[in-house]
Amino acid sequence: MAGQLHLYDTATRVVDQFLPLTPGKVGIYVCGATVQAPPHIGHIRSGVNFDILRRWLTASGYEVTMLRNVTDIDDKILHKAVHEAAPWWAVAMKYERAFNAAYTSLNVLPPTYEPRATGHVTQMIELMEKLIANGSAYAPGNGDVYLEVRKLKRYLTLSNQKLDDLQPAEDADLTHKRDPRDFALWKAAKAGDPSWPTPWGAGRPGWHLECSAMAHTYLGESFDIHGGGLDLIFPHHENEIAQSEAAGYGFANRWMHNAWVTTSGEKMSKSLGNSLQIHEILKKGVRGIELRWYLGSAHYRSMLEFSFESLEESSINFRRIEAFLKRATEVIGSAPEIKYSQAFADAMNDDLAVPTALASISEAVRLGNIAITAGDSAVVAACAAEVRGALSILGCDPSDEAFAAQGAANNEALDGLIQLALDQRNAARARKDFAAADAIRDQILHLGILIEDTPQGTRWSIQ
RNA sequence: GGUCGGAUGGCCGAGAGGCGAGGCUCAGGACUGCAAAUCCUGCCACACGGGUUCAAAUCCCGUUCCGACCUCCA
C-alpha cells in the first residue's frame, strides 16, 4: 500500500484504497457545527481530524474542495434565542464566531466553502420539489414535508439497521406522517418562529435536508468523502443518503466518522454536563498548538480520554520536538525544509495512522539530536526537514504563521538584556565563582527564563 | 430489543499470527563545575475461561465489564 492512500469507509467497514471520482481532485463534505453554544474540545477534535485529512490530501497532490457547513437555524438555536433574549440570527452569529475563533487558535484551516443553512433555502426547495415530483416525499398540507422511508429502495445501510428493529419513537406524531419513521425535510412554521415561503407553506429547513442541498450545490451529485462525528451516522447521515439517493444522486462515495473525546469513559457533551470548552482550556495557559497536538495525537477512529494530566504529558512531548527544531534551525542557519519521510507517508497513507506517524517523528528527533551533538549539520537538516514536514501535516509546525502570535518573544532589547546577564554569569564561571554564576541563573529563572549551557554556548528560552 | 465500538504496563496510546510502536513518569548511567538539555540502559503489558496453531495481544467459541446510536448531537 506504499504511496497510495487507504482510508476506512464506515459504509463498508473496511480500509481500502482511496480513489477519487475525478483524478487529482477530491471533494469533501464535513458536517460542521450547529451554532447554539460555544465549542467544546470534542467539536474541535472533529475539526482537527478532518483538517489533517485535508492537509494530507493536499500534500499528496490532490486539489481539495472542502466544505464544512454551519447549521444556523434549528430548534436549539430558537430556544437559546428565547433564553438569551436575543434574535435567533444574533445567537447563531455569536456562536459561529466562537467556533471560528476556536478553529483559528488551533490552526484548523478554513474550509474552501463554509455555507450556512439559511443561505440555501432555494436549493432545498428545489430538492424537495424533485422528491415530491418523483413520489419519494409528500406534503400533508400543514406545511411539513416528509420523506417516505418505506418507499426507499434501501435505507439504513450505513448503520446496518433494519427499519423494524428501531426503537419506536416515543413522541411520534402520526397526525401528518404516513409512517412514524418518515422524517421531516421541512418543518411548518410555528407562530413567532422564523420561516421561509415554499410551495407547501411557510416553514424552516429540516436538519438533514440542508446538508444534502449544500453538498449537491458545491460538490455535485456525487462526491468523494462525507465526514462527521460518529453520532451523526444515524439518523443524520442515513437521512442524507435517503434524500439524495431518492433524488437520483450518487452522493458520498466514502463515509468517515471521528470518535469522541471522552471523560471518565463517557462521551463529552453539553447535555451530559462534562464538556470542556476550548477557550476554558486556552485560558489556563495551554497553547493552541499544544492542544492541537494533543487532540490530533490519537487515531481519529479511537476514543480520546481527556485529562489535564495527559494533556500536559502530550505538551511536554511536543516541547521536546519544538526544542529540537529550534536547535536544528540554529545549527543549519535557516528554517528547515518541509519533507515527508517514507515512514511518515506510509503511516498517513494507512488510514491516517497518526500515532504511528508520531513514532517516526520521535525517531527523527532522536537521530537529529545525536547529529547536533556530533556536529553533523547535513543529518541535522535532513532530520529537521522530516520533523517539520510531519508537523506541518499535523498542523503543528511552530513556524507556521498561524502560531506566530502565540510564539515566544523575539525581542532584541530583551535578548540584549539577558545577554548582559549571561556575560556576567560566564565571567563568573570563567573565574570558577560558581556561587555567583548559579545565583544569576536562579534569579533569571525566577523571571521565567531558562538558561542552558551547551557546547555551542549558553542559550536561553522563556519558560 | 436492534446496531456498532472498546478493555494493552504506573499513565497516555499504537499494533491485528512470530520479533515488546512511540510518548510521559520513575530508576540508573554518559556528558556537565553543578544544573538543564541531549544520548544510553532498565521498568517486559495485552479483561477472564477455553480452543486452533510449531507460534495468539492478534484467529475461533464462551464469559465479564465499559461505552456509543436508535429521530437533539462532532
Image: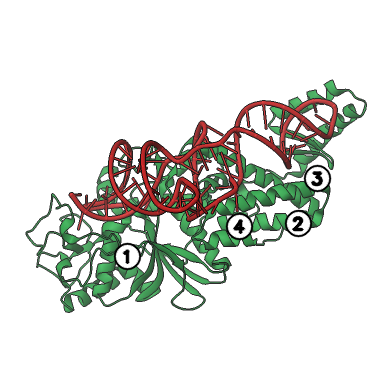
Chain colours: A green, B red
Q: Are marks 2 and 3 in contact (CB under 8 Å)?
A: no
Q: Label 2 sits on what residue type?
A: Ala
Does label 3 lie on the same chain as label 4? yes
Residue at left 34%, top 76%? A221
Number of the front mark, 1 or 4 = 4
Cβ–Cβ under 8 Å for marks 3 and 1: no
Q: Which residue is mark 4?
A: A392
**Circle 1 marks a residue in which chain?**
A
Q: Quadrant of residue A455?
A: top right
Q: Amino acid at mark 3?
A: Thr
Instruction: Report, in whole angstroms, how far the alpha carbon at label 2 lies from the one at label 4.
Output: 16 Å
User: Alpha-carbon distance for marks 3 and 1?
Assistant: 55 Å
Query: Which secondary structure, mark 1?
Result: helix
Q: Where does residue A183 sit, x and y in percent of width and height?
A: 19, 62
Q: Mark 4 is on which residue type?
A: Ser
Q: Which residue is mark 3?
A: A373
Please say if B42 is above or below A125. Answer: above
Q: In x, y percent, where is residue A316? A: 61, 39
Question: Are dots 2 and 4 on a single chain?
Answer: yes
Which residue shows up at 17% across the image and 79% down it?
A: A133
Label 2 or label 3, whichever comes before in sequence order:
3
Q: If you read the primary sequence from the N terminus, does the residue marked by circle 1 or circle 4 appear first?
A: 1
**Relative horizontal placement of residue A131, taking residue A20 as reference (left or right):** left
Dot 3: within a 10 Å radius of its alpha carbon, few (fewer than 14), some, or many (20 or more) residues? few
* Amino acid type of the residue that numbered disc 1 sits on in the rendered structure: Cys
The image shows residue A253 at horizontal and vertical percentages of 38, 71
Q: Which mark is residue A381?
A: 2
**Which residue is pictured at 66% across the width and 46% down the height?**
A322
Query: Pointer 1: what residue?
Result: A211
Q: Which x, y percent locates residue A344?
A: 60, 58
Helix, strand or loop at disc 3?
helix
Label located before the other in sequence (4 or 3): 3
